[in-house]
Image: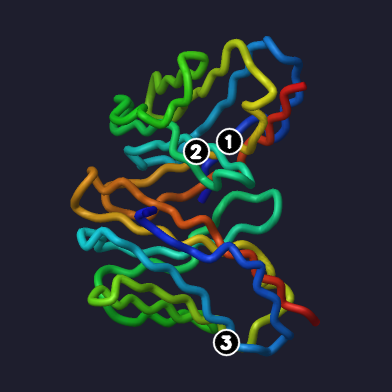
Amino acid sequence: DAGVIQSPRHEVTEMGQEVTLRCKPISGHNSLFWYRQTMMRGLELLIYFNNNVPIDDSGMPEDRFSAKMPNASFSTLKIQPSEPRDSAVYFCASNSERQPQHFGDGTRLSIL
Amino acid sequence: QKEVEQDPGPLSVPEGAIVSLNCTYSNSAFQYFMWYRQYSRKGPELLMYTYSSGNKEDGRFTAQVDKSSKYISLFIRDSQPSDSATYLCAMSGLTGGFKTIFGAGTRLFVKA
């Protein structure tokens, strides 16, 4: 079975540029989660979707961050404009109701 | 006070030792308890999943949940260098729409 697939694996870009992270959840899962992980703050939930609808975006740090889920098999997390403090590993996870989440291998983002 | 407390370590043990990893929590509504293992530059991988109180064993791994004390543990028997990773506890429950709360993670090093 294919797991959660994220792309790109690594992204290095300059401050002010737009960054788009992509996620394909596990087929059949109806919830999708975006997390950010740093040494200082650990794993932080940014936003999650249920049946393609955003349910809780209280973790999105600023208006510079936006996320979409146009269909059950694809989601994007966009940062515009990017800043050096956005540098982190971004994870996508998915699950079906009341089941544990399964994570992708993350996108390592560096903003110079 | 955080909802989930986990000692970040690092914890260093010799090969073959029994490892005990622990988390405490404050929300009595948590019902689902998980342990994830995260290797460097990889996403968290589900290791153990238990519902309510009790023990669950899977090979060298045993998960324990004590809801009366709000305390969960993961034991690793006959630890191997390949067990060196960060271990995150996680839990969810009826409140908050089954939102999963993660511990900070404990870094484990098993020395050959």
Q: What kind of residue is marked 2?
A: Tyr
Residue B83 position in % (x across, y down): 66, 72
Q: Quadrant of the C terminus of chain B?
A: bottom right
Residue pointed to by mark 2: A35
Q: Earlier in the sequence, mark 1 or mark 2?
A: 2
Cβ atoms at labels 1 and 2 below 8 Å apart: yes
Q: What kind of residue is marked 1?
A: Tyr
Q: Are marks 1 and 2 on the same chain?
A: yes
How is the model colour-coded?
A: rainbow
Q: Could you tell me which chain the residue with mark 3 belongs to? A: B
Q: Check the image and report above or below for B31 versus B12.
A: above
Residue pointed to by mark 1: A90
- The structure residue drawn at horizontal position 32% and vertical position 25%, both measured from the top left corner, is A54
Q: Residues within 10 Å of mark 1 (few under 14, many from 20)?
A: many
Quarter assignment of residue A20 = top right
Q: Is residue A7 left or right of residue B110?
A: left
- The structure residue drawn at horizontal position 61% and vertical position 62%, both measured from the top left corner, is B86
Residue pointed to by mark 3: B77
Q: Is residue B97 left or right of residue A75?
A: left
